[in-house]
Image (tube, grey):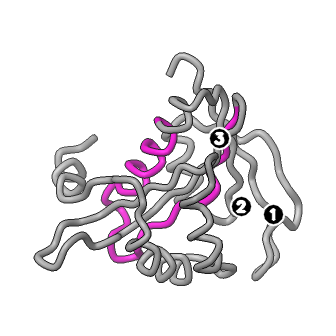
Amino acid sequence: MPASRRAATDQYRTRAAQREDLEAVHVLERLCFSDPWSLRSLAEELDRATSHFVVAVRGTEGGDEVVGYAIAHAAADEAEVANVAVSPTHRGQGIGAMLVQGVLAQVRAAGALDCWLEVRASNEAARALYRQLGFDDVGLRKRYYARPVEDAVVMRRSLRGA
């Protein structure tokens, strides 16, 4: 990682999501996605045994400021990255990579051997990040997304020996 990006990410850390983070996560969800999850759905993720829910925070005088989050699910030997979001004002600083690496470590520890995700075909920045983190394009789901209707690129990463 270049020194400038490393210095930027030093001010952020990841940790397990907590109930008090949900409002901030929901704000990010609505800001980042055209078809956002509800606050109730996000809350259910905290209680789901197969969920791995992490937030990226920046410490402030008033406490932790949530600047991103990631949710992944693991069952048996497979996992899926369900959602990743970073505040637009904090993008380009390595936070997305920190979040994805965090949930990948958790699902690997839970026994997952392969991890899957879907990403909007037009989301070149996310696709580039996932490729950088070892994901490969393996398929296309036509008209997968609504609002707007768009194809999803299916990506996969092996967690074996990682």
Which of the 4 image quadrants contains residue 137? Answer: top right
Q: Is residue 159 magenta?
A: no
Task: Give the extent of the magenta segment.
Answer: 78-105
Which x, y percent locates residue 101? 44, 42
- Find disc 2 in the rendering and name its residue: 121
Crowd class of label 1 (few under 14; some 14 to 19; many from 20; radius 10 Å): some
Q: Which residue is located at x 37 percent, y 67 percent?
A: 91
Q: For the residue labelled by badge 3, is the local secondary structure a helix, a strand or a loop?
A: strand
- Find disc 3 in the rendering and name its residue: 74
The mark found on residue 105 in the picture is: none
In this view, 54 is above or below 64: above
Which x, y percent locates residue 87? 40, 73
The residue type indicated by label 3 comes to: Ala
| Front label number (3 vs 1) | 3
The residue type indicated by label 1 comes to: Asp
The residue type indicated by label 2 comes to: Ala
Q: Front-most of 46 and 113?
A: 46
Q: Front-most of 142 and 101?
A: 101
Which of the 4 image quadrants contains residue 121? Answer: bottom right
